[in-house]
Amino acid sequence: MATKTKRYTAAQATILFLQNQYVERDGQVQPFFGGCIGIFGHGNVAGIGQALLQYTSFKYYQSRNEQAMVHTAIAYAKTKNRLGAMVCTSSIGPGATNMITGAATATINRIPVLLLPGDIFSTRQVAPVLQQLESNSSQDISVNDCFKPVSKYWDRINRPEQLITSLPEAMRVLTSPVETGAVTISFPQDVQAEAFDFPASFFEKRIWQVQRTRPDKSALQKAVEIIKKAKQPLIIAGGGVIYSGATAELKKLVNATGIPVAETFAGKGSLRYDEPQNLGAAGVTGTPGAIAVAATADVVIGIGTRYSDFTTISEAAFQNKSVQFININVAEFDAFKHSAIALVGDAKEIVSDLISLLKNYKVPAAFGNQVVKYNKQWDKKVSEVYAKNHGLPISQGEVIGAVNTASAANDMVLCAAGSLPGDLHKLWRTRNPKGFHLEYGFSCMGYEIAGGLGAKMADPSREVYVMVGDASYLMMSQEIITAIQENIKLTIILINNNGYASIGGLSASLGTDGFGTRYLYRNEKTGQLDGKYLPVDLAANAASMGATVIKATTTASLKAALEEAKKIKNTTVIYVETDREERVGGYAWWEVPVAQISTSKKVKKAHDQLVKNKSTQKYY
C-alpha cells in the first residue's frame, strides 16, 4: 500500500509540523509553540514568510531586532516553565548572526528556543550571494556555522526531505529538561521554497511527554542517611525547583525539617520571602544569613542549581572542612558537581521522597531558631533600605522598594544586567514562584524590554515590571514599538545613573577608579572621558516610540507614578535618576583578576586583597 503524501514547500511543511507539536507533563497537554517572531529578508521572505502568510493559525510577531526577538522567545519559555517556546526566523547574513547572542543566552540558561535562520543557496550555482561568507577551504560553510557552539542542536537542511528526520530531533532536544537550549536549523533560501511530497503522517498531532525521572534508590537512601546526621544543613534552591513545579513540596519539606534555604538568581521565588526558613539570596549577592550559614554548613543540598561562581562565591562560600554535597538535578552533569552524592532526577519527585524519608528529622533547635532570626533581621534591613530617604537623586534601593510595594502578589519584576540584578536579588520580596524573572546566566544587556514582552505574552494575567538601567536601555530599547504594536502593556522603570554603574563599582573595587564607565564628554584639557555628563534625554526617546512617559524625581513622585501607571493601558515608561554612588552594600567577594603589577597604590592594595581572598577558595 502506497504511503499517503502531501505536497508542500519545505517552509510550509516546517510551519505545519511545528503547529502540531504538543507537550505533556502530569497529564496536562498544551501546544508547545506560541508562534513565530521574525524579521524578513531575501533569505526567508519567500520561504518561511510565505508559509506564515498562508498558515495564519501559527501566529506571527514582528520584531525590530533579531537579537531582541530571541530574548523575547527566551522570556516566553522561561515564564512557561520551559513547557512552551517560540520560533525565531531571520534572513541570512547579519539577520542570522544577530541571533547568536540570543542563542548563547538561551543555551546558557537552558531555555528552549527554535531558531530558523536563512542560509545561502544549497545548489551553489549562484555564489557568492549577497551576505555570503566565502572560504577558500570549503564550500560547506556559512555564517550560520557560528551557531554551532551556542546551540544544543544544529542542522542544515539541504534537501526538503531532511526535515522528516531533523525536526523530530529538534523537538526531542527542545522538550528535554536535560538537553534543552537553543536549537538552530539553518535553512537555505532555495530549499525553503522547494516543494516535496511529505508523508501525511508527518503532520499529525504529536505529544512530547516531559517525564519526571527518579533517582537511584541506593543513592537516595545514602543521601537521606547523611541529611539525618546533619547539624547545620543548607538547601541551595536553583531554577530547577521552579521549572519542576516543586515549590509547594520544598515549602513542606523545610517547614517540617527546619532546613534553611538560600536562593540563586534563577531559584528566587522557590519560597516566599517571609517563609521562616528562607535565608534569601545565595552567594556573591547574598544576604548575611545565607552567607553565614553557607560558611558553616556541614551538608549542602543543591536542588536544580548549576553552582555558578556567583552562587559559590567563586568556590569560597562553603568553608566547613567536612562539608558534604547532595545534588538533586535532572541533569547528571550538574548532579555530580562538587563530588556530590548525585540524585539524578526530577526535583518535585525527589523532594516529595525526602518529605516522607525525613519525617522524623529536625535540625537542632538552636540552629533552627538562628535561621528564623536571620530571616527576620534581613526583612528589617530591607524595610530600612526601602525607606532610606536618601535625598536627590534617590537611591536605587528606594526605587526597588517603591516598585515592590506597588506591585501585586501575582506580578513579576524582570531584569538582566548591571547593578540592578544584585540589588533585586537581595531586596525583592518575592511572593510567587514567577514573581522574580532575572536573566543572569548570561547577564545579557538589552534583554530587559524584549524579555518583558515575552513574559507578558506567556502570561497576560500578570503585570510585568521591567527594571532597566540607562546603559542596557541604550543597547536595546526598540521592542517598546513591538509592545505598542501588539497592544501589550509593560511598565518599564528606566533608571538613569549616567553610565555603567555596576562595572564602575567593580572597577573602583579593583583600584581602577571606574575608568570608562561614565557617560561623559571627552575633556579637551585631559584628553580623557572625564568632562560633563552627556545631555541624553532617554524619556524623550521612549516617548518617540509610542510609550507613555512619566518622570519621577523623589520617592513620593515615583510612588505616585507607579499608581498612575496602573491606570494606563499603554506601555508606560517611568523615568527616574538615581545616585550611582549610593549602593546597597553587603556584597561578598567575587573573583575578578587584578593587575599583578601597577604604579597605582589602589591597584596594589586590590591585588593584595585578591590574594587573601583566593586563599579561601576550595576544591570539593
Image (cartoon, rainbow, N blue to C red):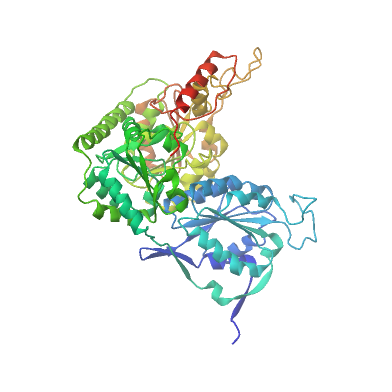
Look at 36% across and 21% down and name the residue there. Answer: 390
Q: In this view of the protein, which residue sits in the foreground, 131 or 403?
A: 131
Location of the N terminus (image quadrant): bottom right
- The location of residue 489, given as percent across then percent down, is 43, 46
Q: Is residue 286 shown above or below 97?
A: above
Please state which of residues 149 and 2 is positioned toward the viewer in this rendering.
149
Q: Quadrant of the C terminus?
A: top left
Left or right? Give the position of 527 relative to 491. Answer: right
Name of the residue lying farthest toward the top = 525
How many marks are shown on the rendered structure? 0
**Residue 267 position within the rendered picture, expressed as x and y whole percent measured from the top left:** 38, 44
**Horizontal placement of 111 versus 140: left or right?**
left
Is 25 or 581 nearer to us in this picture? 25
Residue in the picture at 29% in, 29% down: 383
Q: Is residue 537 left or right of residue 24?
A: right
* Residue 485 visible in the displayed image: no
Whole-percent x and y of residue 497? 49, 26
Residue 118 seen in this snapshot: yes
Q: Residue 482: x, y in percent?
A: 53, 47
- Residue 259 lies in what quarter of the image? top left
Q: Residue at x 58, y 81 (%)?
A: 4
